[in-house]
Amino acid sequence: MTGRVRLAVTLGDPRGIGPEIAAAALADGVDAEVTVIGAKEQIANLRADRHEPVGSWRSGPRGVARTRAAQAGLLAGRAVERAAAMALAGEVDAIVTAPAEKHALHLAGFPFPGHTEWLAHLAGGVEVAMMLASERLRVVLVTTHLPLRDVPLVLTTDRIVRTGEVTRAALQGWFGIAEPRLALCALNPHAGEQGLFGDEEARILAPAVERLGAAGPVPADTVFVRAMRGEFDAVLAPYHDVGMTAIKVASFGAAVNVTLGLPFVRTSPDHGTAFDLAGTGRADPGSMRAAVALALDLATRSRAS
């Protein structure tokens, strides 16, 4: 395939910093054919080859906070659905999604825990995984948005193996790593200390490690350090906060969320809507710039393979 990469960028929740960080990320020009998708008032002046409005933000009701949130969620949701439809139709090679508020999306009728699960549904129920990537560290979540008390109930050997297989395929096909080195982060302190602090390592995690040919289970207090020193290409984290905390301490503002397993590339910044920063001029577009750059890099490599 020849020509420039085709990229769709959604602006996220119109109340948040998505529109302004997208504008900053695109301001200096991007070596791609860019389509911006969002509220028509917020996309009008953004630097792009095409603008895809999904509704009006200013004309909506303003008096009730719940109504405003639902309207914002509807615009953000329509943008994601439009971007995914374009990607699935082969009209774009990659999508970058600015942050959206989950509560607003739910109010608007999009009942998914996050973009990862939502995009998997839109792509036909494919097996996906959520990676946070930076130059220093790659972390993949085995479980994502659910209460901590539910993690041991859904953390199975098969689930870990499926996540590891999706990760390995993406590292090979998108990141160009011929033989990825995976590590599985332990669930319990000291990797269970031979059953003293829990039996999940021996009962659930160790069989997954054997099937994947990965390292571990490695205690959480050392596995990310070892990965940052170059020992592993990615760490599989058993639950959301252990993985997210590691990547954000290591690379906040420079990390990128990548949805692995989709038939197209999708990235997003490593932060949320930051309503308190919207319109103040203090929002840092660094992670959005990194998300655009990584989307272009992965899409280029995917097109070449």
Image (cartoon, grey):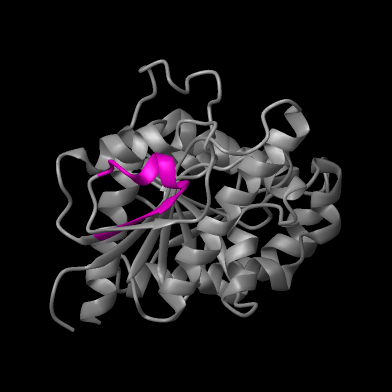
Q: Name above or below for residue 166 compared with residue 274.
A: below
Magenta-drawn segment:
34-46
Residue 193 at what x, y percent from top left?
74, 43
Q: Name above or below for residue 233 compared with residue 229.
A: below
Query: What residue is shown at x 42% (from left), y 31% (from top)?
Result: 252
Query: What residue is shown at x 77% (from left), y 33% (from top)?
Result: 66
Quadrant in the picture for residue 303: bottom left
**Does residue 27 appear anywhere in the picture?**
yes
Check if residue 37 falls in the magenta segment: yes
Query: What residue is shown at x 31% (from left), y 65% (from top)?
Result: 175
Query: Does residue 271 appear left or right of residue 232 in this picture?
Result: right
Q: Nearer the viewer, residue 84 or 54?
A: 54
Query: Does residue 97 appear left or right of residue 74 in this picture?
Result: left
**Does residue 254 appear anywhere in the picture?**
no
Q: Nearer the viewer, residue 132 or 23?
A: 23
Q: Nearer the viewer, residue 192 or 260?
A: 260
Q: Nearer the viewer, residue 9 or 289?
A: 9
Quarter of the figure with the C terminus: bottom left
Residue 248 at what x, y percent from top left?
48, 33
As drawn, the residue found furthest toward the front would be 59
Query: Does residue 121 appear left or right of residue 98 in this picture?
Result: right
Check if residue 70 falls in the magenta segment: no
Residue 117 at what x, y percent from top left?
64, 62
Residue 272 at what x, y percent from top left?
54, 35
Quarter of the figure with the N terminus: bottom left
Query: Does residue 60 appear left or right of residue 80 in this picture?
Result: right
Numbered disc total: 0
Q: Name above or below for residue 273 compared with residue 43.
A: above
